[in-house]
Image: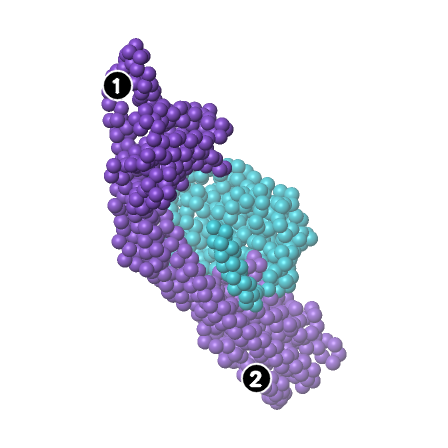
Amino acid sequence: MKRMRSLALLLAAALLCVGCGGAPQSALPGVAPADCLTVYTSHPEEIYAPLIEEFEDRTGIWVQVVAGKSGELLARIDEESEQPRADIMFGGGGDSLEDYRDRFASYRSAECDAITNPAFCGTDHRWTGFSVLPLVFVYNPKLVSERDAPVGWRNLTDAKWTGRIAFASPAVSGSCYTALATIVQLYGEEFAARFARNLAGRCTDGSGDIIPLVADGTYSVGITLESTVQKAIADGAEVAYLYPEDGTSAVADGVAILKDAPHRENAEKFVDFMLGRDAQSFLCGAIRRRPVREDITIQGESKLENLNLIDYDLDWAAREKGTLVALWQREYEAGGGDGA
Amino acid sequence: MKLRKPLSFKYRLFAGSLVVALIPLLLCSLTMGRLFNEMLVHQTAALGEEQADELAGRLSAVLQDCEAALAQVAGEPTLQRALVDRNDDSLRKDAYLLLYEAAGEVRTQVGLSLYDVGGYLQYTTRDSGQDERLPVNWGVLRKAARAGDTQYLAQPSGTEDSRDEVCLRLARPVDSSTGMRIGYAECSITIEQMRQLFAGAFEEGATVYLLTPQGRLLCTNGVDGGAEAQVIRQAMLEGSMPEDDGLFFSRVEPASGCLLVLRRAVPLSSRAIGLMRTILLAAAVLCVILCVLISLALSRSLFSPIARLSGAMHRVRSGDLTARVPVGRRDEIGQLTEDFNTMTGRLQTYVAEQVQHQKDLNEAQIRQMQAQLNPHFLYNTLDTMKWLAKIHKLPQVAQLAGSLAGILRCSIASEQFITLRQELDLLQRYIDIQKIRFAGRFNYVLDVPDRLLDCVVPKLILQPLVENAILHGLNARDSGTVYIYAHSEGETLTIAVTDDGCGMPPEMVERINSPEPKILEGHLGLYNISCILKLYYGGAYGLRATSYADVGTTVTIRLPVRKEEAHA
């Protein structure tokens, strides 16, 4: 037995000697934790990639991007609130950010001086708007002449649009919920119910389908975001759009620093950069998004202050979401919908 | 138990042979395999370092050339003039000439351009139609404008197959002699140009990644470069190594800060290592099988003779002393078998002797008992004769009857041992009878020390000797003497009966003195005594006779000195 043990020891020693031959010099440079930043973003890659690359080049910070849908990312932030893995939530409508405001740290960037509209900053600056997304009506100019197009929300209950309005369920689409809340805020729940019935039981699977289905004639008009339709037009879609004259709501998508963010200093640099003139100019130049800064004007676009913006109550919209969606669902089904 | 022993022996044999066979095999193959792999990896690593240096050197050299070209362009007054005055055609031609001249050797490797202060392209050596305008508050021009000298911008590629897209840009501001900013000199390297630059500096199978200072992919020769670069970046962020079996070599290009990563496949692929493992495993399995066979064969060759021996031992244990095992081999087992056979033979002889011994003793006792036939009747008759003789005043008859009765009583008593005193008393009675019979034809001399009178002897041991002396020794003589003397020498008591008669025939003497005396015809008494002494006291004691014709005979009894109390 003793002999066996010594033999085993010998064997182990021999293997150890062989094992100690030295690992090959294969290495990659590491990154200091202080140079890192983790960003959760719901923006599409063509928006966040150039911005983040420029940010990296300017600051030398290594940004780790986790892209996803805003609802999922916010839920993840909520899950990880004990020990946040991300520093920044980049993207997501102001109303949903406001919903999760407890997860975000208050930070007022110096750049906020150029953002005067209080609707574009969260409570205590827990989030700050990044780009503004006004609601517009999109229509197919082949089916609807500029004269006939609905000029305001009040026209949406007209009999001529029955079953011709492209609209997604507000339970699914954030922008459609904003539209529903805008309607209620302007004309009350009764009018919103009539609007829901006027859809005649037809609605799109998501807000992304609205413009294609208007462009191919399935619907005549639709409700969508200004930047979406502008991008579609730039990509060659034959649609036209107008701003509702009885007022429209513009929700900003925002950027927020997480509470207890592991890289707070880098996160502040990120917010400063995104709200800064350069990034905001780049936003309206290359990406065709409406910047949140008022000191930047877009050539060929109506200025933000010239739009008839209603004072959209984010807080109220967030609070009433359940009720309003239920109302819409009920009336939509009454109008012939199958609940889809 | 019977089964376990050979089994456990078998297992030990198996384990032993396994250790002896398997461990060197494993040790050897593992050591060799590792050493081999290690050596190849080291070679690959050394080559990888060399190639990484070469790649970084090429990039640095080109970038230095670019910087020199930019400096030349920025400082060229004709070009400065051409940037401001765009309508002079001859100036334009001169400007292009100068631009190509400045590009010099790196002309094919990079594109050299001049942008005006608004970021619009004015002159370029690359195919125009690309990057007609660069933003001045974004990217490389902003950096150059702020720093006032040459700046780099690494531009990660958006799409996979954008060969003509610029991946690395250098720019420096062009200031007029009065210090006014009039434009930017810019140098750009496309993905394709970068690939050309790196081509040939590494072998087939290796992958080069050029990354931004923050680890984003600029260009690669890899097929699925984007995803792999993402893995590398993630590994750098986590401070770990990518989970693939490649070897990585990285360099930071000092001027631009770009990361150059060379990935080489490990020399022994995991498939080759797997194959080696399989072979090793097969060898180990073969080894185990051989060990099993050898241990089985060995244990069988050992176990079957041992089982035969064990069976024979069982037979011996149950009483069969004839059990023998055929030897049939010359090794240790054969030796053991032979020893067993010898031992059993000896045992058999010994037991036979014991049985014979007991038989002899029994026969002597039976004879003794036959001699005691109806002794009480004889005794009582003799007693009656004694009293009748006394009544009829026949003193000799009375003495004869009395002495005979005494001898008879003693001989029929149950005790086997009496003291020498009692023995001599009996002898006296016998002598008395014989004296009457032979009417004083012999003398009788007794010489026994008093201290020996308490010695214990078997009863009636002297009477036959004396009888022998009287009947045979003094026969046909007118007178004679019988000497009886005893002495002790250490633990041995010697009693000698000597007569001065005609002597014994020599064959008689020889027979008496032989270690195993045969029955003496007509001398049953002597034989019995010899037997009794040997049976009681062992072979060291017994009778001894010396005799000389016409001088006399001495018969000596040797027996151990034992006192009465000790014997009781």
Element type at mark 1: helix
Q: Does the image show residue B187?
A: no
Instruction: Please identify the quadrant where the C terminus of chain A is shown.
Output: top left
Label 2 crowd (10 A; few <14 / some 14-19 / many >=20): some
Q: Which residue is mark 1?
A: B378
Name chain B's colour.
Answer: purple
Q: Nearer the viewer, mark 2 or mark 1?
A: 1
Residue A76 location (% of width, % of height): 51, 46
Near-viewer residue (B455 or B198): B455
| Residue type marked 2 | Arg
Pointer 2 chain: B
Cα distance between the residues tagged 2 and 1? 161 Å
- Left or right: residue B346 versus residue B258 is left
- Relative height, residue A98 to residue A269 (above, below): above
Q: Which residue is mark 2?
A: B107
Residue A146 location (% of width, % of height): 44, 56
- Relative height, residue B210 to residue B124 (above, below): above
At 30% from the left and 36% from the top, the residue drawn is B475
**Letter of the chain shown cyan in the rendering:** A
| Residue type marked 1 | Leu
- Left or right: residue B229 versus residue B277 is right
Near-viewer residue (B113 or B568): B568
Seen as rendered, the residue at the extreme top is B391
Q: Does the image show residue B291?
A: yes
Label 1 crowd (10 A; few <14 / some 14-19 / many >=20): some
Element type at mark 2: helix
